[in-house]
Image: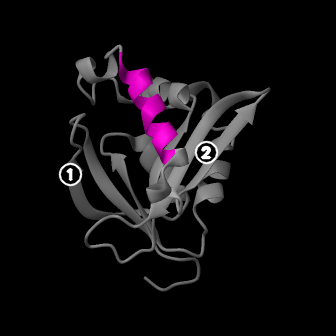
Amino acid sequence: MARVHVDSWRETYRGLMPDPVLDDPGLLRARERFWAGALTDQRYSSNRVAVAELDGAIIGIAMSGPASDADATWSWQLHVLYVDAARHGSGAGAALLDAVLDPHDAAALWVVGPLPRAQAFYRKHDFVPDGHSRTEAGNGAQTIRMVRRPAGSQA
């Protein structure tokens, strides 16, 4: 899981995050600690986690949890969704999204702003930008928030 996380960051965010963050030799270990905590710490027991596998190797990861934004009007938040670049377009991302977010739940996510492919993927799954943006602490990425109303709701 940590390998997919790190490889995806390096493939996707080069030029959008500082090189020292992406090239940090401790990045893989930091992501290993992140996932160990996410999977074992009771504080995160309500999170939903899924992996996509191909021939016994993890090719995608996803995690959602209860809404964490202070102004949330949605119940769930997508925290992580990464698929190996070689598997983009395979359906793994959509399957992971469905595994961690119920389409009947209102949800939100933060996506790096200048990533049209990622934004198009989320738009295809009924997420729309809500006008909020922020700079991520620790990596400096510029992100925008996208929200999805529950299936069948009126805008």
Q: Is residue 62 visible?
A: yes
Question: SS for tag 2?
Answer: helix
The quadrant holding residue 112 is: top left
Q: Is residue 66 above or below residue 97?
A: below
On the image, numbered disc 2 is attached to which residue?
A: 93
Which residue lies at the image location 80% right of the left edge and 26% below the top edge?
55
Q: Position of residue 30 (x, y in %)?
A: 39, 28
Residue 10 visible, this angle: no
Report how many numbered discs are placed on residues in the image.
2
Q: Is label 2 in contact with label 1 (beta carbons under 8 Å)?
A: no
Which one is earlier in the sequence, the residue at label 2 or at label 1?
A: 2
24 or 101: nearer the viewer: 24
Q: Is residue 58 left or right of residue 3?
A: right
Q: Is 152 displayed left or right of 74 in the figure?
A: right
Q: Nearer the viewer, residue 128 or 44?
A: 44
What's the residue type where badge 2 is placed? Gly
Amino acid type assigned to the residue bearing label 1 in the image: Arg
Where does the C terminus fall, quadrant-wise? bottom left
Label ID, residue 134: 1
Is 32 one of the magenta-colored residues?
A: yes
Residue at (33, 23) in percent of width and height: 14
Relative height, residue 84 to residue 121 (above, below): above
Assess disc 1: are there few (<14), some (14-19) or many (≥20) residues with their C-alpha within 10 Å of its C-alpha.
some
Q: Residues within 10 Å of mark 2 (few under 14, many from 20)?
A: many
Query: Residue 66, image x and y in percent?
Result: 45, 66
Start-end of magenta stretch: 26-38
Rounded to the nearest angstrom, the CA distance separating label 2 from label 1 is 24 Å
Name the residue: 63% across, 48% down.
50
Q: Measured from the top left, where is residue 101 in percent x and y? A: 57, 62
Residue 7 on image: x %, y %: 48, 23
